[in-house]
Amino acid sequence: MVARRLRLTGGRGSEPGDGPPTGPHAVIPGGDLPLREQPLDAVLTRVARGDEGAFEVLYDRMAGTVFGVARSVLRDPHQAEEVAQEVLLEVWRTAPRFDASRGSARTWVCTMAHRRAVDRVRSSQAARAREATVGAAQTERDYDQVVERVETRLEVERVRHCIEGLTVRQKDAVTLAYYGGHSYAQVATLLKLPLGTVKTRLRDGLIRLRDCLGVGSDV
């Protein structure tokens, strides 16, 4: 489990007026429930208003999931924990930018975690490349490694672009299953939907991804 050691310092990453409404009469969906029973979207809305208690709740609910997403990309558990801490701090700073019309709070946080973990992989690769001795001759193996890295980066960008083309419902299901590492049953529980509905959304989403990426029809 990710250690609780965040310090909520520094400015928020938004301009005045960005994000959810903050007026005294603004309505928060599910906001009439006790804080720890409120939907995650409602909790994130409170975080966007600077509510540290709401952030504590969000942290407790999402820290394990964020670490799991980072760990699925990074081999080193210590790096995965560092990334998880960075992501949770970024959630605090940028919560006003969350747009519920584009996906759920859980999807927003998981996508952020996956993007940050991929960035860490790229950064590590770049650091190793800078440290490597530049030889006069490049072997075929060196060439293949460079090509593989370029292709991997392009593939990540293609997948991210195609995921943005899914419907909000499909994006939620696909993100939880393939970025969050959840089983179909777990996705159904998290989204509070029948298992059959989740399977249908995942299948439809994967078909759209397949068509977007131009791969085979084995989905």
Image (cartoon, rainbow, N blue to C red):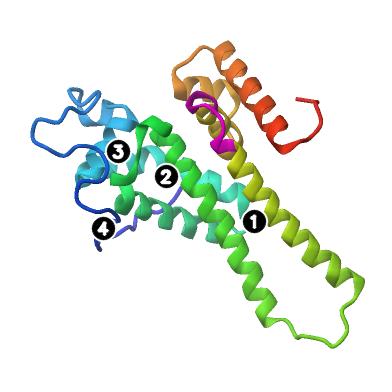
Q: Which of marks 3 and 2 is nearer the N terminus?
A: 3
Q: Answer above or below: position of 151 versus 177.
A: below
Q: Earlier in the sequence, mark 4 or mark 3?
A: 4
> What element does badge 2 sit on?
helix
Residue 90 falls left or right of residue 107:
left
Callout 3: few (<14), some (14-19), or many (20+) C-alpha neighbours within 10 Å?
Answer: many
Can you give x and y, in whole percent of width and height, for residue 215 in the image? 78, 35
Q: Mark 2 points at which residue?
A: 63
Q: Which residue is nearer to you in this view: 61 or 144?
A: 144
Q: Which amino acid does label 2 sit on?
A: Ala
Q: Mark 3 points at which residue?
A: 44
Separation of marks 1 and 2 at Cα, in angstroms: 18 Å
Q: Name the residue under label 4.
A: 8
Magenta span of residues: 163-170
Separation of marks 4 and 1 at Cα, in angstroms: 28 Å
Q: Mark 1 points at which residue?
A: 75
Q: Is residue 167 magenta?
A: yes
Quarter of the picture containing the C terminus is: top right
